Image (cartoon, rainbow, N blue to C red):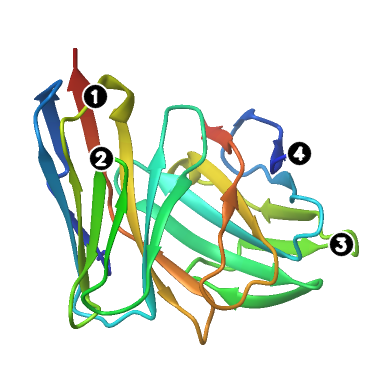
Amino acid sequence: TQLLEQSPQFLSIQEGENLTVYCNSSSVFSSLQWYRQEPGEGPVLLVTVVTGGEVKKLKRLTFQFGDARKDSSLHITAAQPGDTGLYLCAGVEYNFNKFYFGSGTKLNVKP
Amino acid sequence: KAGVTQTPRYLIKTRGQQVTLSCSPISGHRSVSWYQQTPGQGLQFLFEYFSETQRNKGNFPGRFSGRQFSNSRSEMNVSTLELGDSALYLCASSRAGQGPDTQYFGPGTRLTVL
């Protein structure tokens, strides 16, 4: 069983559309990270959110950490084909330096 | 600065064999973590090494083991391979391995067990 559940698992949208990916857990984490992974490569860190309720923006990407530090969301505005990839959230336990990854959301943005 | 490198990139083995995968972290990084990625289970933590010591371990059987050398390079070994061990094995390095550290992943080793 995954400690972190991501939804949706798959998403296929047209260029220009908006989308939101969710990452939920019953556990509290010290921080939460979002990664993007492209075929043939390892995941690349996009952002780390630390404080409950925190919102971070990275160009067209907006990341939010839930108040209780159990869940997070990633919102992409005006998606582009270059956003295509596997999006992974990861809960971090500082004390144990452990990373728990979600199951991933496979995003396909069609031109 | 060179990124995390993993060798080999692809590997085909048969059941019962053993395999050793190698990971060279970014220069100056002392923590190396290993993950198994499969379509069904996603990315699962195997273990983490810091200064040649295993600091954390995931829930994998003893057939999965690893080590880290004084230059921070790391190897993982899987003995008595099973079909279910087919996966992408990723290693990630970080500077000090504490707090909200950034993990840098290598491209992975794709292991196929026949």
Q: Nearer the viewer, mark 1 or mark 4?
A: 1
Q: Which residue is mark 1?
A: A80
Instruction: Read off the residue under disc 3.
Output: B69
Identify which residue, B10 or B92, lies in the foreground.
B92
**Residue tagged 2:** A60
Q: Tell me the CA gap for discs 1 and 3.
A: 43 Å
Q: Residues within 10 Å of mark 3 (few under 14, many from 20)?
A: few
Of tags 1 and 2, the one toward the viewer is 2
**Apparent side of residue A80 relative to residue B53 in the rendered image (left or right):** left
Instruction: Looking at the picture, tell me which residue is in the foreground, B53 or B79.
Output: B53
Name the quarter where the N terminus of chain B is drawn: top right
Q: CA distance from mark 1 to mark 2?
A: 10 Å
Amino acid carrying mark 4 in the image: Ala
Which residue carries the number 4 mark? B2
Relative to A67, does residue B76 appear above or below in the rendering? above
Return the disc, 4 or 3, that comes first in the chain's sequence. 4
- State which chain disc 2 sits on: A
Mark 2, other Cα within 10 Å: few <14 / some 14–19 / many ≥20: few
- Residue depicted at 11% across the width and 40% down the height: A19
Three-letter residue code for mark 1: Gln
Image location of residue A62, percent across then percent down: 23, 52
Q: Residue at x 70, y 64 (%)?
A: B95
Task: Please tell me in which quadrant of the rendered image residue A18 appears.
Answer: top left
Disc 1 to disc 4, how far (Cα)?
Answer: 29 Å
